[in-house]
Image: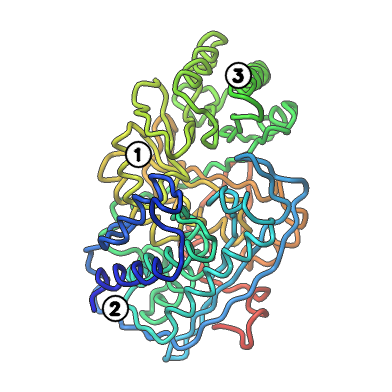
Amino acid sequence: MNRRKFIKSSSLLAAGGGIAFGAETGCTPSSRNRDARLQTGDTFHTPSTFTGLAGEKTIRITETDANFERESLIRPFGFKGGAMREIWQTAALLGSENGHRKFGICTQNVLWSDPAVFEAHSESAGNALMYNITARALQMIKGQTFRNPVQLQEDILDELWQYGQQITGNPDLKETFILNALVGVDNAAWLLYCAENDIRHFDDMIPVAFRPALSARHSKIAAIPLMAYNIPVQEIRDAVDAGYFFMKIKIGQAGTQDEMLQKDMARLTEIHQAIGHAHTEYTDSGRLPYYFDANGRYEEKETMLRFLDHAQKIGAFDQIAIIEEPFAEEKKFDVGDLGVRIVSDETAHTDIHALERIRMGYTAIALKPIAKTMSMSMKVARLAYEHDVPCFCADLTVNPILVEWNKIVAARLSPFPGIRGSLGLVESNGHQNYARWDVMLGHNPTSDRPWAKVKDGVYILDEDYYRQSGGIFEQSPHYASWFDTKPH
């Protein structure tokens, strides 16, 4: 049975088993559309047609395992109408018949990946559901063979998505919920793939078809901190004084649409008064770029236009570099006429969704190898590159090891418009949010390297950084201790 027929049969069997699909259950049109796509054998991603590396081996997975630990946050981290109090760190182990054993790390974020799941369950229950997806994926691939991680992921995505719909009871389950759960599995697959094929550098790991999109070699990466609603403006000013020049600032505050707009305009005014006069060597204008993230809170374009009109009025408009996700996913607005660069993040679940957003006028994409897997991020990066759409790497409040997995991509993306010099962009806000960030740094074997530390708002990437591939091939003794035998 081929994969398309298998997906169709699995979907029909699942529907017959009592899963809530179809109009008679009161599903929304979007859920019926998603079900119809599965019934006809369509997938939520574009199957790759690229040829892998020459001579790559067929790898048989003979061992799998997983574990997790909870990390508390300094304070509740609020966005999208919810608030997280802890973040689960998970690890997935893959072993091959040739004796190689590698694990990958994942930082779960249920609220970001699917707010409906977060709202419908307790925080721990939502995390357990995502961890269950990871465990199910490991069950599916144990005993299977693969030639490269992209193909391995494609072989399980659709069936795993259906499984996620079942266990969450959500026929509209967002694809990113599945991808988030697969980050550790995918990273382990890449490390195992490299071990089997004697690949020792990240550049050699990248499939040839994806290399044009990841061909830069920046000497610096801007470290982008996150300024949430409750961060005092003084702290933003202090960050600028410390050398940070590109900061992510949350808008879309609580309340009605009018209340939200008034708060956001007041926040913009305060910020512009505090740092609007500051200068930086890293932009063409010499002024600080403003990066706003609305997390889909704006319900109408008119509301966003009023925000932008206010920015014009106070002289801040020309400093707005990007606005990320102003509208909810179901709002299919053309954003090409807003006059600013609009970024797709969580709505670009996969390469299919990224293409849809590009056609709607989105002119940048926030890549998340640490949230949507390295395999899917490479596919999205190639799509964006082919459409001349710039990318950067955004955070998921991940642990220090995953910061490096994000940086390794950010270091190779084409320069972002308006940014001067050989400079990549990567968001990292874990140090602002984890209660035990210093302890977590100790879990990263390369945390003492100069290129792992921020200096004057940037990471400096020397030859040692590229020679060691940002340390992503080094396995952490802390996470290795979760498994019976230390991987090599």
**Mark 2 burial class by Cα count in 10 Å: few <14, some 14-19, many 20+:** some
Image vertical order of residue 97 relative to residue 41, above or below: below
Position of the C terminus by quadrant: bottom right
Secondary structure of the residue carrying tag 3 is helix
Q: Where in the figure is residue 64, as x and y percent of width and height?
A: 51, 82
Residue 275 in sight from this viewpoint:
no
Mark with earlier residue (3, 1): 3
Residue at left offset 26%, top offset 63% = 41
Going by the numbered disc 1, the residue's amino acid type is: Arg
Q: Where in the figure is residue 281, as x and y percent of width and height?
A: 52, 29
As measured in the structure, the alpha-carbon distance from the residue carrying label 3 to the one carrying label 1 is 26 Å
Q: Of residues 149 and 34, which is closer to you in this image?
A: 34
Q: Of residues 122 and 481, which is closer to you in this image?
A: 122
Position of the N terminus by quadrant: bottom left
Going by the numbered disc 2, the residue's amino acid type is: Glu
Horizontally, residue 450 falls left or right of residue 372, namely: right
> Which residue has dot 2 on it?
56
What mark, if any, has residue 258 been given in the picture? 3
**Mark 1 burial class by Cα count in 10 Å: few <14, some 14-19, many 20+:** many
Q: Of residues 7 and 487, which is closer to you in this image?
A: 7
What mark, if any, has residue 357 been given in the picture? 1
**Mark 3 burial class by Cα count in 10 Å: few <14, some 14-19, many 20+:** few
Image vertical order of residue 348 relative to residue 128, above or below: above
Residue 130 in sight from this viewpoint:
yes
Closer to viewer: mark 1 or mark 2:
1
Mark with earlier residue (3, 2): 2
